[in-house]
Image (spheres, grey):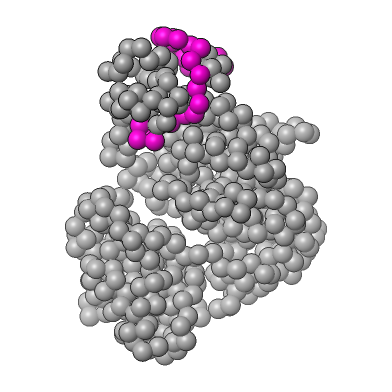
Amino acid sequence: MQLKELTDHLLDVLHIEGDSTVWISGIQMDSRRVSPGEIFVCIPGIDGILEDRHPYAQDAVSKGAAALVVEREVEADEAIPRVYVKDARYALATLSARYYGYPSSRMKVIGITGTNGKTTTSYLIDHLLRHQGLTTGLMGSIVTRIGNEDLSFAINTQDPPDLQRNFRKMADLLTDYCVMEVSSQGLDMGRVIGTRFRTAVFTNLTQDHLDYHLTMDAYREVKGRLFARLGNASDTEAAFAVLNADDEASEYFRRQTAAQVITYGIKQEADVTASHIRLTAKGTECVVSFRGQREKVLLPLVGLFNLYNMLAAFASLLVERIPLQSLAEGIENMKSVRGRMEAVNAGQDFSVLIDYAHTPDGLEEALKTIKEFTRGRLIVVFGCGGDRDRTKRPVMGSIAAQYCDRVFLTSDNPRHENPDTIMLDIRKGMQQVGYAEDRCEMISDRKDGIRRAIQCAASDDVVVIAGKGHETYQIIGGVSYPFDDRQVVLEALAEKGV
């Protein structure tokens, strides 16, 4: 595709310097990944999050970049064409979608946003669609699945060149649906501009990412962009907003969207509801109702929060006219999602659960659920991420104190912070509610913290390893090291003689 063909639709272009007939063979925003013939987009930086790419223009040219997209003058070979734009992030997303032929329009894309539950909800939707015999793709924090291939990406919502390239791969495989997680940072950075969503799903809005968004109002506004961008409904290209009626933020999202709205919930009136709820250690029994239809459902995932995730998944597929009875049948063989209430069992006489809970609401929901079926002591191992929202640390400490008999504070991803400082911030919340100090241990080495918790566990106890879930790394001092909670648990169990 020629440069002028790639950019002729982009109203954001101020002017082009150089040969606009040069051939473009790809799009990049990372100079290290540039191959000959690709266009390099110099996106601006975000303090503490992302480097400005303008200083890397010549590096990209040296690797063979055929053209540059810039917001300002750059020091680079003057023979290389430059496309000047007002907003390089917007340009990156729209150019990526155009280059790959707007692939999201060739399938139905279901996007899930919210503080907690995005991953599990996406897996539930994906599982239920495949139960219907449909071809699916999956994008999220654990894996991107295209056909039979599993790929890993460092961020939840992929950057536009990767995102649109993967959409194109799915489209070429005649994928019916792509189910993807949409993070608040991804929305704020414009990564999904150029993506046509069939359905947008909202799980919940609780405290998280305030280091980035600063206020809950700003956090909510960013989430709202997903719903505001849903198109007006028509017979041929209907769009749907699936909203949690029990979360007050849903009313804001309802006002933001022109799409058809379907709600789900338990406490408030909603289109899709659950009643006769029975929570057990093995899962959840309930009756789901939708427009006069009622079906008994056996969900093999524990906790009220997973019931909400299931209702969100059901609502997303009921708008696709999949019968409620078929959804109820399909959910019964759903397996737990990696790192989400995942049991590690080596034959021990106590339980070990690994969960991604890393927010106050997520931790409380997990511990409250587990407490209901714990016959012995409830023991938790957790920390908080460094260089992130400090205000949630004492809150999470007080939550752990409320539900747990023993607490082992340790490192999560300390990044550039001192792990001891993070643990002390958490412990302040425990002290404020009068939690006995001899019931809490601070062990900065996460492996040692997990081992200590396993060593002290006795018959009928439940040990919860919270915070990292599916992650297989730990970031210390800006360096990522291999680390897998489940592997450490298995090693600790072996040391215990299990």
Is residue 175 in the magenta section? no
Q: Is residue 57 above or below residue 146?
A: above
Residue 291 position within the rendered picture, expressed as x and y whole percent measured from the top left: 78, 54
The answer to which of 317 and 105 lies nearer the viewer is: 105
Q: Residue at the location (64% across, 67% down)?
A: 334
Q: Quadrant of the C terminus?
A: bottom left
Residue 459 position within the rendered picture, expressed as x and y whole percent measured from the top left: 42, 90
Left or right of 358 on screen, residue 271 = right
Q: Residue at the location (62% across, 71% down)?
A: 300
**Residue 217 visible from this viewpoint:** no
Write the start and end of the magenta stretch as one range.
7-33
Q: Residue at the location (38% across, 15% down)?
A: 80
The answer to which of 396 and 141 lies nearer the viewer is: 141
How many badges with numbers are in the image?
0
Q: Quadrant of the N terminus?
A: top right
Q: Is residue 392 above or below residue 197?
A: below
**Residue 486 visible from this viewpoint:** yes
Q: Is residue 420 above or below residue 31?
A: below
Q: Is residue 371 above or below residue 53?
A: below
Q: Quadrant of residue 361?
A: bottom left
Residue 373 position within the rendered picture, expressed as x and y whole percent measured from the top left: 51, 80
Left or right of 446 on screen, residue 251 = right
Residue 245 position within the rendered picture, expressed as x and y whole percent measured from the top left: 60, 52
Left or right of 240 on screen, residue 35 = left
Is residue 16 in the magenta section? yes
Q: Residue at the location (41% across, 48% down)?
A: 154
The answer to which of 162 and 205 lies nearer the viewer is: 162
